Amino acid sequence: METRSGRTFGFLPASKKEVADLEWDQPDVIIFSGDAYVDHPSFGPAVIGRVIESEGFRVAIVPQPNWRDDLRDFRKLGRPKYFFGVTAGNMDSMVNHYTAARRLRSDDAYTPGGVAGFRPDYPTLVYTKILKQLFPDVPVVIGGIEASMRRLTHYDYWKDAVEPSILISSGADMLIYGMGEQPVREVMRLLAKGVPFSSLKTVPQTAITIGKDDPLPVQKSWKDELFNSYEKCVADMKLFTVNFVIFEKESNKTEASMLIEPSGNSLVIINPPFPPMDEREADRSYDLPYMYLPHPRYNKKGVIPAYEMIKFSVNIHRGCFGGCSFCAIAAHQGKQIVSRSEKSILAEIEKISKLPGFKGYLSDLGGPSANMFRMKGQNMEICRKCSRPSCIWPGVCPNLDASHRELTELYKKVNRMKGIKKAFIGSGIRYDLLFPEWNKNAGRAESEYLDELIKGHVSGRLKVAPEHTDHLVLNMMRKPPFELFRKLKSRFEIIANREGLNYEIIPYFISSHPGCTEKNMQDLANEVKSLGIKPEQVQDFTPTPMTLSTLLYYTGFDPYTGRKVYVARKPEEKKRQKEYFFWYKTGNRRPAAGNGKIGEKKRKTGTRKPRSF
């Protein structure tokens, strides 16, 4: 089958030779990515490339260009007809590169062989500046998680400084935030009609900069929210927190305002998002002709670990209404759940079953949270105006339809498919939705779901994320009480014993989250020890841009209450807290801890020198 872009389906061209073989005079769009090119719907650059192609355009991709030589990788495909696209890839590059202690990692899961060093820090910035240097008159559109979560003034943990919008620091012409299919389709539609790129000022879910004296873009139905300037945020962290509260509330609305943030001589304009995709639109993204494989250029370069992890998994929905303080999912993917149709999901499984090496086992049927499929408000008019960061904290919203019935039926249908021996659930389970102590509407459907999950979809270990045991710390995280984990563990063991299954439950925990003291960590260690758990899935808190937890870390106070929050900032404090997880290892038995300090010496605001890594 030949596309309107003039080629039969296969991999997107990723070299000068591949473009020449297609006899293109030039691509319409060239995407630069910090990841290796994997043509799979779990990899953002591939999705956006396929979306552009499906609209009838010629798109090429340059994965992991060399930014340290004579820049030939940035020149080799020449100029695109419309614009360059730039993304750091599926992960924030700084989380990819550094540990929570700011130590350089020795591997990269998105590179063949897991080899580190094939992308710079902040690829979005580096690639954009190079392209602007080489092709100053060609527009650059940035996107992906790294750009999305830096769309406004933000605190950067690795620089230990308040930074301006990435639009300002990179010099890009447009930023697409969140899941980019809808804005990309609209941008391509307008460009094809002959609208100049410089006139694309009111495309939803995009951000641009204009001169501070220029007229604001106008859309009749949009409301405006004026933020404190970048300079004011650097000088006064309280003004920074005011901005954050507005940002978080607007991010959680489906009918949001246009956000305006002064920065130097410019205004950063964040246009409201598109409405969440419906089922048909979601299917449209996943039904594109992906190859479900890494590009052949990597055949002799070793496996790509991130691909190996997900190659036999299926994403059944997007978005998350959990609203955890430390998580960027809602601000990027959205709070509303976007679910695919059963037909689309089963068709993808059929494709996966034909992949090389498939032996009948799906590694995951999930999403950001495994068990939010098809969940939404009973009255969507209420949801359209709602700005709650979470639909399930500090309690489950009475308007939320959180029935697990359809998800349970989907699991059963998949396990009955020809060639499928078992469909495991690898994504995390929100167990607070399963029990009436937290979700008063939980009933028979939720009990049946837990039964089906444990009997038919656990690969020996069920992973869940209580994150902590202390009630006050959990409140800071916007997580439910630890008592619910105890109930889950009890139910899990009853079902596993009844079915004769030698399974175990694996909890995830976080140390050094704002509000957590050494005493809290000591209590956590005692709690999990009493339950017979030796924690394995643990991490030290890493502040990432534009989350509430990062704001707490930077400011030391809660923007909603004004109360001071204890923060473990020093490397030795963070190390001591993490060691409590490993009480069962020789040499890691921590002494009894003190209560920790409630307040701290006042920190200076403003820009600070980057720490050495």
Image: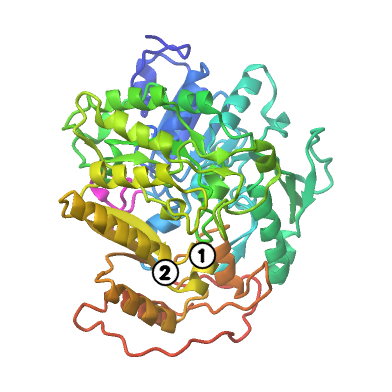
Q: Which residue is mark 2?
A: 468
Q: How far is the residue under mark 1 from the one under mark 2?
A: 9 Å
Which class describes the residues within 10 Å of circle 2: few (<14), some (14-19), or many (20+)? many
Q: Using the rendered image of the protein, determine whether residue 473 is visible from the camera's viewpoint.
A: yes
Q: Amino acid at mark 2?
A: His
Q: Does the magenta stretch mainly form a helix, a strand or a loop?
A: loop
| Horizontal and vertical percent position of residue 335 | 56, 45
Q: Is residue 59 above or below residue 539?
A: above
Magenta residues, as a range? 105-118
User: Looking at the image, which is closer to me, 254 or 380?
Assistant: 380
Give me the residue at 42% from left, 37% from top: 405
Q: Up-down: is 524 above or below 91?
A: below
Which residue is more in the foreground, 197 or 232? Answer: 232
Q: Position of residue 225 (x, y in %)?
A: 77, 50
Callouts 1 and 2 close, C-beta under 8 Å: yes
Residue 523 lies left or right of residue 395; in this view the side is: left
Q: Is residue 611 above or below residue 448?
A: below
- 24 and 331: which one is in front? 331
- Residue at image position (63%, 39%) is 174
For this view, does 344 lie left or right of residue 597?
A: left
Q: Quadrant of residue 603?
A: bottom right
Residue 406 drawn at (x, y percent): 42, 34
Which of pointers 1 and 2 lies earlier in the amino acid sequence? 2
Where does label 1 land, which residue? 477
